[in-house]
Amino acid sequence: MQQTIDTIFETPFEEEVYKGLTDFPKHLSSKYFYDKKGDKLFQDIMNMPEYYLTDREFEILDTHKEEIVRLFSSGSQTFNLIEMGAGDGKKTKIILKHLADQGIPFKYQPIDISQNVLDLLEKSVRKELPMINIETRQGTYFETLEKINITNGTKKVILFLGSNIGNLLHPQAIEFLTHVQEFMHDEDLLFVGFDQKKNPQTILDAYNDKTGITAAFNKNILTRVNTELGGNFDLDQFLHWEVYDPETGTAKSFLVSKKEQSVEIKKLNVQIDFNPWETIHTEISQKYDDRTVAQLAEKSGLEIETQFSDPENQYKNYVFKKTRA
């Protein structure tokens, strides 16, 4: 492998690609799946019959919307509904519509790193729910939460749907939840989706569909390296592979080199060598049970206020508050 010693990186993407592909074992962050093409692929994934997570969470929000709305609006004349990683807002619109129908005053503040996602979401909300006061916030979660905290003392209800928490191993999840908790006040709520442990085959099918949409989604990170950094990855020479450990509840996604090969990335002035069947770890998708979620909450300074589930307990939304002193 040939590489420069004192590489100067212009963007976090450049730095993380360089460090991830020169490390052993190789790895890339799943957050870089998302660009305009990746956003569209993920929307396609959420519409797949195998990807049960979307339907289960949609079912929970639709079935329990009255109780959820009462919980969100209790104890305050108005509140900010802050959503981290809103996507297309399909599920959130259930709650938005019910809040609007009840005449409850609130401001919807979706946060996302992708301006493309936010633009599409704002356009659809203004078209479908023109009565909603929407204020999009582009940036990282914590930077944006800090700005909201500084500028407004209104009650916050923070949404983190779609089991996005599952992209973090438990120590990382505790760190993440602790950080969110630090932005919360006593009356604030944190509403988080957690995919539950279940039949391992059901989980594998959700992340490795036969039509190849999830494979294309994972490989999009290589496409971005080619397009943005002058790489020459041959996507056909990499296999998308999913594994699941039912003991730990951890699903992992890999891109596997089918042969010995070398890839040049011109902008990084580096050559990456691959052995046959060498892996690039791209994503984890953690699955949970009640005991694990309770432990995460306790270690993060949170307590479970309540929870909502689909009839088969495949998926749950937990509501947290700051631990009372």
Image (cartoon, grey):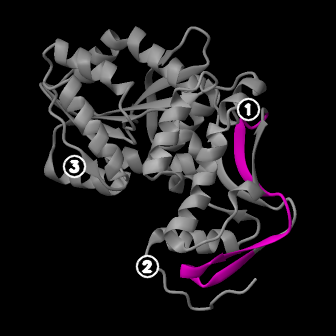
Structural crowding at the residue carrying mark 2, measured as other residues with C-alpha within 10 Å and reported as few (<14), some (14–19) or many (≥20): few
Residue 246 or residue 134, whichever sits in front: 134
Q: In this image, 40 relative to 274: left or right?
A: left
Whole-Å distance between the Cαs marked 3 and 2?
28 Å
Q: Which residue is pictured at 60% across the width and 50% down the height? A: 171
- The residue where tag 1 is placed is 204
Q: Nearer the viewer, mark 1 or mark 3?
A: 1
Specify the amino acid type for callout 2.
Glu
Q: Are marks 1 and 3 in contact (CB under 8 Å)?
A: no
Structural crowding at the residue carrying mark 3, measured as other residues with C-alpha within 10 Å and reported as few (<14), some (14–19) or many (≥20): some
Q: In this image, 270 relative to 88: left or right?
A: right
Give the mark nearest the N terminus, 3 or 2.
2
Residue 88 magenta = no
Whole-Å distance between the Cαs marked 1 and 2?
37 Å
Specify the amino acid type for callout 3.
Ile
Residue 10's tag is 2
